[in-house]
Structure formats: structure tokens, C-alpha cells
Image: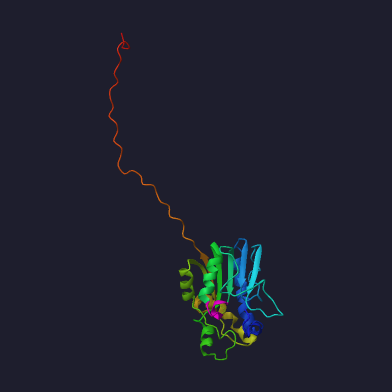
Amino acid sequence: MSIPGLDEWLRSPQGRYVLDWEQQELDAVVVDIFGFNALQIGLPQCEFLRANRIPLRQTVNEFAAADVVFADVICDFTALPFAAHGADLVVLPHVLEFSDDPHQILREIARILIPEGQVIVIGFNPLSLWGMRRRFDRSGDFPWHGAYLSLNRLKDWLQLLGFEIDLGTFGCYAPPLSQEKWLQRWHFIENAGRRWWGFSGGVYILRAIKRTPGMRLIAPKWRTKAVAAKALHPAVQKEGHGRH
């Protein structure tokens, strides 16, 4: 995404801290997802599909700078130039909270995914120290100007589009500190956070599967009344054929 301040933040201690956790988690999540086409929509500076073995893996960005093109496809995220039911996997890293129309982006994802296709959403958690920092930060810098989506709201949106939630995890429990040495000193809280405050991680990853309702089989209208058995008649011997 071409968001002001994004590239600078990615090189900062905060950015490296968040992306290191996300990359490690994504490597584990996507490694066993198979198919023919995989898309990473947004954040083309990162290789979130590097551990996946789908043969065609593409990055999608919007409004790239004229002199630097990171992505394979440049387009509007609300009108993706892909055929319906053509993608097996879509990864959405920090796209929805920095979009003016996140609902439409999810509708497009639902359109292009095959039945049983998977979408993985990465977002900042508003119910965390990072979300609290966003509430009080008025600088307008990345990532504090985003409209963070709670995991429950995101689940509701996906379920309305016919997705089934398959996996959810939180990470980045350290406070959003600016200096690397302080982030390192808070590293001990990661394991404790996963165990005791699982819902309060600064970042979440959610995986959902597109479910397509099956066809309803119409059973034949079987007869409910038993057919009456025909009466048995005794055999009549013909004259001349009797026993003598």
C-alpha cells in the first residue's frame, strides 16, 4: 500500500518487531495451503507468501509510485482485476484498517476465491496497548491513523459473506515503544501474553475459509402405501393330464 509513512515505519524498531512476528506466524500458517493461485494484497515490501508452495504467487498493490513498482499487479483494491472463483489463497496484511471501504474489499475477496478458498487477514488489535496508543496519538503518523477493527467485528463481516473462521492468533504483546533496546527488554512478555492475556496482543492473524452451500437433493416421492398382494388361486389340473 502506498500509505504516507509506511516505508519509514517498516524500517523502524516498531516495524521490524511487528513484521518479524507476522512473518514467522505466516510462514507456519501458509506452508500447508495448496492450490494454483495465491495473492498477497497490500504490503508488497514483505514476502508473506514465501513459505507457500502454490505455483503462482502474486503481490497486488495500489497507486504505486511511478519510479518504484514492488507489486506484480497494480489496481484498486475495491475492484480487483481477477476472475471470479480464480484464487485459492488471499493474504490481506494491514489492508482493511487503512482502507476507506473495507467491506467492499472483503466482498471482492469473497468473489475471487474458489469454494473452500482461504483468506488470511492481519490487523492491529484495538483492544491492546497498541490500540490504546492509537486513541491518544494525534500525530497522524503510520500506523496510528488507521481505523483498527476488532476481531469480533471482522469475524461478523466474514461470516456474513459466507466464511467460516478457521484460526485466530494474537502476538506483539510488548508496548509500542520506539527504541529497540526497550522492545528487546519487553520480549519476555510474549510467552506470558499468549498464556494469560491472549486477546490483548497488538496484532492478530485471522484465517477463514469460504464455504459454499451444497445443493439440496430432492428425494423422489416414494409410495407410502403398501401394494396389496394378489390373491393366490389354486392350480387346476387339465383333463387328461391327471395321474392314473
* Residue 27 x, y percent position in the rendering: 62, 69
Residue 168 vertical position relative to residue 135 in the rendered view, above or below = above
**The N terminus: image quadrant:** bottom right
| Residue at the farthest top position | 244
**What is the magenta segment's predominant secondary structure?**
loop
Relative depth, front residue between 227 and 89: 227
Residue 196 visible in image? no
| Residue at the farthest bottom position | 138
Residue 147 vertical position relative to residue 48 in the rendered view, above or below = below
Query: How has the structure been colored for display?
Result: rainbow
Q: Quadrant of residue 65?
A: bottom right
Tell me: 242 left or right of 18: left
- Number of labelled discs? 0
Please name the residue shown 60% across and 70% down the image.
26
* Residue 115 x, y percent position in the rendering: 53, 61
Please name the residue shown 50% across and 75% down the image.
103
* Residue 222 x, y percent position in the rendering: 35, 44
**The C terminus: image quadrant:** top left
Residue 131 vertical position relative to residue 55 in the rendered view, above or below = below
* Residue 134 x, y percent position in the rendering: 53, 86
- The magenta segment: 94-101
In the image, residue 168 lies in the stretch drawn in magenta = no
Q: Quadrant of residue 177?
A: bottom right
Residue 41 vertical position relative to residue 3 in the rendered view, above or below = above
Relative depth, front residue between 94 and 81: 81
Residue 37 visible in image? yes
